[in-house]
């Protein structure tokens, strides 16, 4: 595959789950990768395994909730690779609980990585993309941006904001040659979701899937690479639901 040949692609939250699959797929599509995560051990493992396939990989252990460190890291990536063509904002930390039980530290931790880090990341990456007259940003949102999920109030608020931010950025940055889109994956087991969804929860999600199966990191990664690539050069401000039709189903 050559959809991202010669492009520099940042993937946040790349140490595991969907982020790792996106990194693998983008590498397979010919990209040079800047992989960002706060989990040093898992990130190094991922970087090592992708490098073994001949892909150029820069790994950056960054707590993206540290705004200055995160923004400086983006400049470092531009210096190292000479350009930034694609940014995939994927990193997240989630905790599901009833609104009445949400403590401020848990609320702020989710907001800090789910929304603030995306905002400041976009702010830092756009000057590089504007300078080269092109770029593609893909944000990970969720079906929770358009319908309620059990005990997911903070998560839903974040993902609603990410979808709105995607549309805003698409309008504001489109004239600079930067496309901004989002992907809303259906539910699937990842390190993150395994910590908040129990067996009964997975059974329920499976039973309400029109395709009779859950989404997969690999399937979502293909959608992200498509949106990031020039194959989607007329797509801007879209939220693509990669959820097998679950969110438009009454099952
Ligand atoms: N898995 C699903 O079912 C699902 C469904 C819809 C949307 N999504 C979205 O897709 C994205 C990926 O989901 P996932 O399930 O693979 O997530 P995950 O929790 O398995 O992985 C998230 C990654 O982000 C990293 N991270 C967390 N806090 C960080 C910080 N402060 N700085 C840097 N890195 C940090 C973690 O170390 C981890 O590697 C998320 O945005 C999520 O909301 C997932």
Image (tube, rainbow, N blue to C red):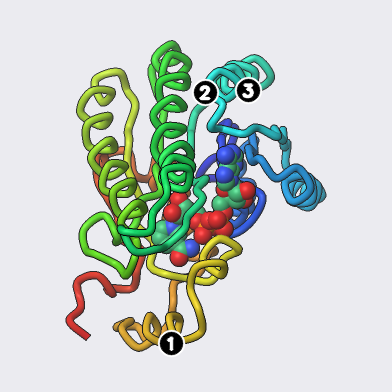
Cα separation between marks 2 and 3 = 16 Å
**Measuring 57% from the left and 65% from the top, which residue is drawn there?**
190
Viewed as shown, does residue 19 lie left or right of 184?
right
Give the SS element for disc 3.
helix
Cα separation between marks 2 and 1 = 39 Å
Q: Please rate how many residues cluster around mark 2, counting C-alpha atoms within 10 Å: few if below 14, some from 14 to 19, many from 20.
A: some
Give the SS element for disc 1.
helix
Residue 148: quarter of image? bottom left
Q: Let me know if residue 29 appears in the view.
A: no
Q: Mark on residue 46? A: none
Residue at the spot of label 1: 203
Instruction: Identify the mark nearer the N-term, 2 or 3.
Output: 2
Above or below, 244 relative to 13? below
Q: Mark on residue 77? A: 3
In front of the other: 184 or 102: 102
Residue at the spot of label 2: 67
Q: How many marks?
A: 3
Residue 53 image position (x, y, % from top left): 77, 51
Tell which tag, 2 or 3, sits nearer the viewer: 2
Q: Please rate how many residues cluster around mark 1, counting C-alpha atoms within 10 Å: few if below 14, some from 14 to 19, many from 20.
A: few
């Amino acid at each position: 595959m050559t959809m991202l040949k010669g492009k520099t692609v940042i993937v946040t939250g790349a140490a595991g789950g969907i982020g790792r699959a996106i990194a693998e797929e983008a590498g397979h599509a010919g990209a040079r990768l800047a992989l960002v995560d706060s989990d040093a051990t898992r990130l190094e493992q991922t970087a090592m395994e992708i490098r073994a396939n001949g892909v150029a990989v820069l790994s950056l252990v960054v707590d993206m909730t540290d705004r200055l460190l995160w923004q400086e890291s983006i400049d470092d990536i531009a210096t190292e690779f000479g350009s930034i063509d694609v940014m995939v904002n994927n990193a997240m930390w989630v905790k599901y609980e009833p609104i009445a039980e949400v403590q401020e530290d848990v609320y702020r931790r989710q907001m800090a990585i789910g929304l603030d880090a995306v905002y400041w990341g976009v702010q830092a990456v756009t000057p590089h993309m504007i300078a080269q007259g092109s770029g593609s940003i893909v944000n990970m949102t969720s079906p929770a941006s358009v319908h309620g999920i059990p005990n997911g109030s903070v998560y839903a608020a974040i993902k609603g904001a990410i979808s709105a931010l995607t549309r805003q950025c698409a309008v504001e940055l489109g004239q600079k040659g930067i496309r901004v889109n989002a992907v809303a994956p259906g539910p699937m087991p990842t390190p993150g979701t395994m910590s908040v969804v129990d067996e009964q929860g997975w059974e329920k999600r499976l039973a309400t899937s029109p395709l009779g199966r859950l989404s997969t990191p690999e399937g979502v990664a293909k959608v992200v690479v498509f949106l990031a690539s020039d194959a989607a050069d007329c797509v801007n401000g879209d939220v693509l639901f990669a959820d097998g039709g679950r969110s438009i189903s009454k099952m």
